[in-house]
Structure formats: C-alpha cells, structure tokens
Image (spheres, rainbow, N blue to C red):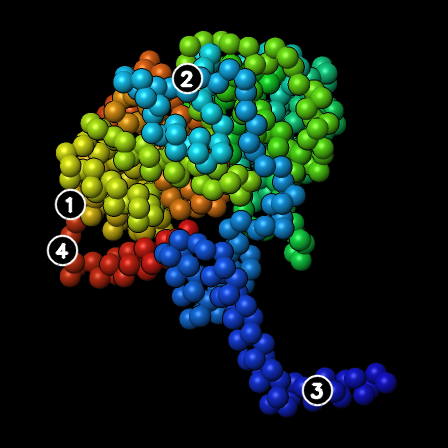
Amino acid sequence: MQALGMDFLHYLVDHPVLPHFLTIGGFLLALFLVARLLAEKRQPGNTFAWLLVILLIPYVGVPLYLLFGGRKIKRLIAQKTRIAPALDGSVPPFDLAGQLLPTVQTINASGAFPPTSGNSVRLLPTGEEMYTTLAHQIREAKHSIHITTFILGRDEVGKKIIRLLAARAREGVKVRLLLDAVGSVFTSRRFVQPLRDAGGEVASFLPVIPLSFRSTANLRNHRKIAIFDQHTAIIGGHNLAREYIGPTPWRKRWRDFGAIISGPSAALLNEVFLADWAFASRRSLDELHTEALPEARRVEGTSSLQVVVSGPDVTGDPLYEGIISMVQEAHASIWIITPYFIPDEVLFRSLMVKARAGVEVMLILPARSNHPITDYARRHYVRELRKAGVNVMLFGPGMMHCKAIIVDERMGMMGSANFDLRSLFVNFEIGVLLYSAPDVAAMKVWARDLLTSCQEPKKERRKRFRIVGNVLEDLCRLLAPLL
C-alpha cells in the first residue's frame, strides 16, 4: 500500500497535470482574494495597490495579503467588546457663538466618546520628563496600574520598568501590562517573567500564530496608554524603550510628545484599556468592571477633553473623520506634526485647498525617519503641498516621533496615531482632543520650540540627475496604501 502511495506521488510530480492543477488552484485563490478585497470596500488607492500586488506578483502578493491584508476581520473583531461607554456630566465645548463645534459634532455622530470637562492636563515634551512622570506614577499608585504599549524594549529602560512594576505588584497593587504581539515580538516571555512572579499580569495582543483563527499580523494595537488608579493617565507616542524615554538625556533619543491627564477623561482611557485587556486575556469585561473605583471619575481641573478611539473595535473611522473636520474647520492656521506622512486623497486635497485659501498650513516632519520607504512615499505629497503654499519644515538631526495637530490655537489633538493610512484606517489607535484655550496654547508653545530644531527642505536636484530616486518615489507612492 505504501509503495502504491509513493508511486502515485511520483506520478503527480512527474506528470504535467500537476502544474496544471497548481495553476488552476492559484487562479482560484487569487480570484477569491480579489473578491474578498473588493467586498471590504476599502479606499480606492488601497484596493488598487493590493490588486496590483496580487495580480502582478501573486507569489508575493497572495501570502502578504493573507498575512497583512484584512482591515477589519469581522469574525475576529466580533469577539472584542465595542468601545462606546459614556460618562455622566459630559460637557461639550462650544464656540464663541454658542454653537457646538463641528469637530465635536462629527466625532459624536460616529458614536465615539463625548467630550468631558473637569480634567487637568500637563504636557510631557521630552523623553526624560515622560520617564520621570511614568516612574513617579508607578511608585505612587495605590490600587491599580494598567499599561498598554506597542514596544517594550529589552534594554535598560525596559528592565527598569519591569522591576518597578514587579515591586508594586509584590506590594499588592493590581498591575496589568498589555503588549502588542508584533511590536514587542523580540520581548521574550522570560523578560517579563519577574512581573508575573511578583503577581502582575502580562498579556499579548493578537499573537501571530500560523493557522490560528485569532492570528493576524495586520491588526496591531498601536495604542500607548498608562492608567493609574483608574484616574490618572499618560498618553502620547512614546514606547517603553531607550529610544523614546529614559531617566537621563541620550543623544540618540527620539523627540516625542505626550501628556499626563487626571479626571473623567482618564477614566475613559481606562475603559479603553479594559476592553483591550478583556480581549487579549480572554477575561470577562463585566468581571473587570467589578474593580471600578467610585472616586476615579472625580473632577480635577477645568480642561475639556475628548477621547477618540480608532480601530476595528469602533464603528466607522472617528479619528480620521475628526482630523478631516479639524482641517476643514480651520480659519487661520493648521499645524501638523507627524513622523510619517502618507495622507489619503481627501486629507491631501483638503490641506491644499486650505493653503490656497490663505490659511497657514505648517507641516513638521523628520528630515529622515526610521523608515526610508515612507520618506520616499511622502515626497510627492510634500512637493505638491509646497507648491500650494504649505510650509514644510524638517526636523533634524535625529528622529522625531511626535504626533499632534493644532488648529487656530483653539483645538489640538495628540495621541498614538501617525498621519498615514495604516494609523488612520487599520491600527488600533488612541487620540485625545484638547478644547480648552490654555491647553492648546501650551501645545502651540511646544510646537514653536520644536520648530527651532527644523529647517526648510533643500532644493530638489534636477530630475535627470535623480532617475533612481524618481523610480523609487513613484513605486513607494503607488504602494503607499500598504505601508
């Protein structure tokens, strides 16, 4: 029997019918993926880019789409709690005429959190301030410490944070650490074991396990939040690694930006963490809510904030729509600070129209980011925006990882999202809008200080001397929706 099986196997390999069946199978698989891609109703640029890769280089495109392609995988995300709780006493910001701000209306209509008043905000403009504040809050927490991060470094900063968290867990504080499975892929189980041994909990968000229903490399949790006693939260773009934060200055440290918030908005950020934790750890959200502290939602200041959650676990794209509304609502100025700039057509054209209408549009980017392919992809957008009158400034030397938008010095946005298609439409992201004048003014002071480390782009060389650069730019822009 075994001999017959081997003979049949050799027959299949040697006979020309096998390539024929493989060709048909590959065609049917590609056809299925194209149908699935069209059914997802992505943006046209994103759909076209995937179609191009799948049809022209199927041996590369098909595996890549199976691994990275799904935007909102319905069966998988159906298991995750939708993030849409609200707080009593929410006070929406109004403009000078007493009308609800269009941006607030836009975000509210998407089913996101309403704005809340009674918060205090302090900006954290350096990695040293971020580290010092984080370490202080860890040491002072009395009930709980909830941290989610994309990257936990295996360096001295990562080790120090694990030691701090383990010390508090041994003292009886409830410590939970949520790591993204892809962002922290090099952070081994052994690295965080001291925290587990001390009684803390560690979970991995959507591990990439071959052939697993819950496995996808595309849907990444890019949120960075640390919540203490359900009442005080740190938010921004910092990961927990030496490149982002540390107790002392380091010449290779990236420039980043964040804030510490106390009050009702911090309680909402804790709700976001709990929904993510329940999904990653397979715990009951109702069970987690039994730990709620009544005093967590007490008033701490006068700031009006709006927590905006973006990703597959929310209806629509509230963060993206909020940014569109901010840009279109601007009357005097729009400042955008981002490490990666790959806008969709609506955002791109909106910025051009605003600049041509006389609105000051300032775009601050790193001169060289840590992803050269995104630098090539942004060239076309930067060139056309400059022609339209947008002021583009390049930060350097060093990497800038800040994410912020300031409009008319009357509202600002900060958080984890970059100004690119992946952050706006694919990743799990978090943002906070600031509506109080003192907070927005503080953001503008920080942005002007950042501007002192920037220069205007150099004149581009004549095209006949940069043929290779032109080809790379066009190719990267064509594939930009996949980045």
Badge 2 vs badge 4, beta-carbon distance below 8 Å: no
Badge 1 vs badge 3, beta-carbon distance below 8 Å: no
3D distance between C-alphas at marks 1 and 3 = 64 Å
Quadrant assignment, res 339: top left
3D distance between C-alphas at marks 4 and 1 = 16 Å
3D distance between C-alphas at marks 2 and 4 = 49 Å
Which callout, 2 or 4, points at the residue further toward the start of the chain?
A: 2
Determine the secondary structure under disc 4.
loop
Q: Residue at x 38, y 38 (%)?
A: 321
Residue 384 appears at what percent x and percent y? 20, 48
Going by the numbered disc 2, the residue's amino acid type is Ser
Report whether residue 433 is seen: yes
Label 1 neighbour load within 10 Å: few <14, some 14-19, many 20+: few
Quadrant assignment, res 67: bottom right
Quadrant assignment, res 253: top left
Determine the secondary structure under disc 3.
helix
Determine the secondary structure under disc 2.
strand
Label 2 neighbour load within 10 Å: few <14, some 14-19, many 20+: many
Which callout, 1 or 2, points at the residue further toward the start of the chain?
A: 2
Residue 404 versus residue 251: which sits nearer the camera?
A: 404
Residue 400 appears at what percent x and percent y? 35, 34
> Which mark is nearer the camera, 2 or 3?
2
Report whether residue 443 is seen: no
Numbered badge on residue 462: 4
Give the residue number, with chain letter if any, for mark 2: 304
> Which mark is nearer the camera, 1 or 2?
2
